[in-house]
Image (spheres, grey):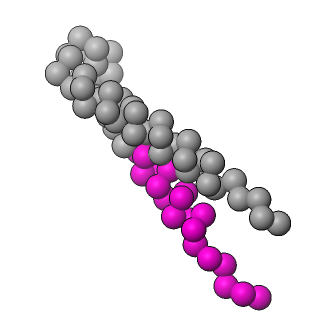
Amino acid sequence: MGLDIKIPIGLLFSIIGLLMSIYGLFTNGNTALYAKSLNININLWSGLLMLVFGVIMLIFSRWKKPAE
C-alpha cells in the first residue's frame, strides 16, 4: 500500500499555519483585534503550532520503515 495520509495533512497544516503566522505578524500591533483573547495574538500562536505540526507530519512521512 503506497497510500500515506501524512503528506497531504502535513502540507495542509504547513500552508495554513504559515498563512496564519504571517497574518498574526502583520496584525501584531492591533490591540482592538486581540482584546477578546486577553491581548494574546492567537493568530500567531495557533499558526506557529499548526506549522510545527505540519512540518512534523512531513518529517514522519519521509521516515523510512525498516525492511521486514
Q: Is residue 61 left or right of residue 25?
A: right
Q: Residue at x 82, y 66 (%)?
A: 1
Q: For residue 19, say whether it is visible.
A: yes
Across and down, in percent, residue 2 comes to 77, 64
Residue at the farthest left position:
29
Against 44, residue 27 (above or below) is above
* Whether residue 65 is situated above or below residue 55 in the rendered picture: below
x then y, percent, for residue 4: 71, 59
The one nearer the camera, 39 or 13, is 13
Work out which residue is located at the far right of the displayed protein and give it.
1
Image: magenta residue range: 49-68
As for residue 57 lying within the magenta part, the answer is: yes
Residue at the (62%, 54%) spot, across then down: 7
In the image, residue 41 lies in the stretch drawn in magenta: no
Find residue 68 and report its horizontal and vertical position in percent: 77, 88
Which quarter of the figure has residue 48?
Answer: top left
Q: Main secondary structure of the magenta part?
A: helix
In the rendered image, the residue lying farthest to the top is 32
Q: Residue at x 60, y 64 (%)?
A: 61
Question: How many marks are shown on the rendered structure?
Answer: 0
- The residue located at (54%, 47%) in the rendering is 11
Across and down, in percent, residue 13 comes to 52, 43
* Residue placed furthest toward the bottom: 68
Q: Is residue 47 visible?
A: no
